[in-house]
Amino acid sequence: MSDVYSRLREYLHTFPGGYPTTPTGVEIKILKKLFSQEDAELYLSLTKEPELLADIAKRLGRDQSDLGEKLEDMAMRGLIFRNRDGDKLLYKAYQFFVGIIEAQIDKVDTELTQLMDEYFPSLGATGFSLETKQMRVIPADTAVEEKTTVASYNRMREIIKDDELIAVAPCICTQMSDARGGKCQHTTIERCLAFGDQAQYYIDNGIARKIGKDELMNLLDTVEEEGLVLCTSNTEELSFTCCCCTCCCGIVQGIKLLPQASLMANVCYNAKIDPEMCIQCGDCVERCPVDAITELDETMEVIADKCVGCGVCVSVCPEEAIGLEEVATATSPYPDEAKMHASVLKERGLV
């Protein structure tokens, strides 16, 4: 029988987010830190679709009470996902990114941070060659409020349903920054948003709190003032949205290093500067989270390949010389994660 952690690594790599090998074996070190051997064996027995506890116990031939305690313990540690159907609990295997690692909020330490710093470039590269991107950026509201052609799925305030369960959690990237001895430059630390089943999971695990729509709207105002980037899944229906900063967030830092933002994200918009109105004050250059604005002789100019269309530059321009334009090659987000994941798995030859 092969090593349980190698088998766990192989299973995780069959998820849309992937879990590739590295020359140093850092991916196995991460698994050994998070999973005991018993955890790993139990994880490998779970399917990717939620199952009732009773059905899992029957399928595995295990005592339901004992198995329920073990599954709940793993769910509380962010290693598997828990769904609720009324008073019934369902469990399923959970992909590593986005998934297990984000559920380690309040469990971050220096060792895990160092391991993730080493692994993230390999992990993030999984989707570079794929046409299907699993991430997109939602523009800041002030950048789209006058543009009636912007679809509702690109207007954060219009995406949220009145009856939707919303939760806000501390940012795991800032916690990792703290573990490195750094400190986030922004005052808003509670800024990872979850919706629906994802929100319930975070709330049940004690790593997020429920908020109402009014508090969410106030939070969106605050993160826009701070110039944070709304990173979310490349879907119309959202399960999470991260309000990302440049000083801590691995995704934004990764995009900043890439020659083309579209390697990592579905870029729907580019900022555009009117050279006739630009006074070269430099506010937009200072504000841009991905270094996508450069200074020419008489105006500022957006480097289209680098721009993610976050729109945070728009509100700081004193001359209102910046707007957003749709990218001709952009694709519409998938309706939901199931369809997006199916597309990724097909491209990876896993279905």
Image (tube, rainbow, N blue to C red):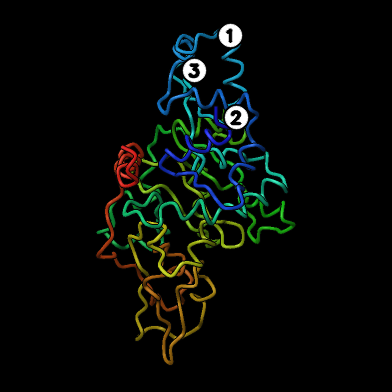
Alpha carbon separation for disc pair 2 and 3: 14 Å
Q: Is residue 200 left or right of residue 137?
A: right
| Residue at position x 45%, y 15% in the image | 52
- Contact (CB < 8 A) between labels 2 and 3? no
Where does the image place residue 303, in percent across and percent down from the top left?
40, 75
Closer to the camera in the image, 102 or 231: 102
Residue beneath label 1, please?
Answer: 65
Q: Is residue 325 left or right of residue 67?
A: left
Disc 3 secondary structure class? strand
The outermost residue toward the front is 1
Residue 180 in picture, x, y percent from top left:
72, 55
Q: Can residue 295 be seen in this view?
A: yes
Residue at screen point 27% across, 55% down: 331
On residue 89, the disc is 3
Q: Do the numbered discs 2 and 1 sit on residues whose CB atoms are within 8 Å? A: no
Give the mark nearer the N terminus: 2 vs 1.
1
Mark 1 surroundings within 10 Å by alpha-carbon count, few (fewer than 14), some (14 through 19), many (20 or more): few
* Location of residue 185 in the rendering, given as x and y in whole percent from the top left corner: 65, 61
Q: In which quarter of the image is the C terminus?
A: top left
Q: What residue lies at 55% left-to-right and 31% top-to-bottom?
A: 2
Horizontal arrangement in the rendering, residue 290 relative to residue 248 (left or right):
left
- Foreground residue among 262 and 161: 262
User: Which amino acid, by three-letter code, is at mark 1?
Assistant: Ser
Q: Name the residue under label 2.
A: 205
Give the residue drawn at x 63%, y 50%.
189
x and y percentages locating residue 59 in the rendered image: 45, 12
Q: Mark 3 packing: few (<14 Cα in 10 Å), some, or many (20+)?
A: some
Is disc 2 placed on a helix, strand or loop? loop
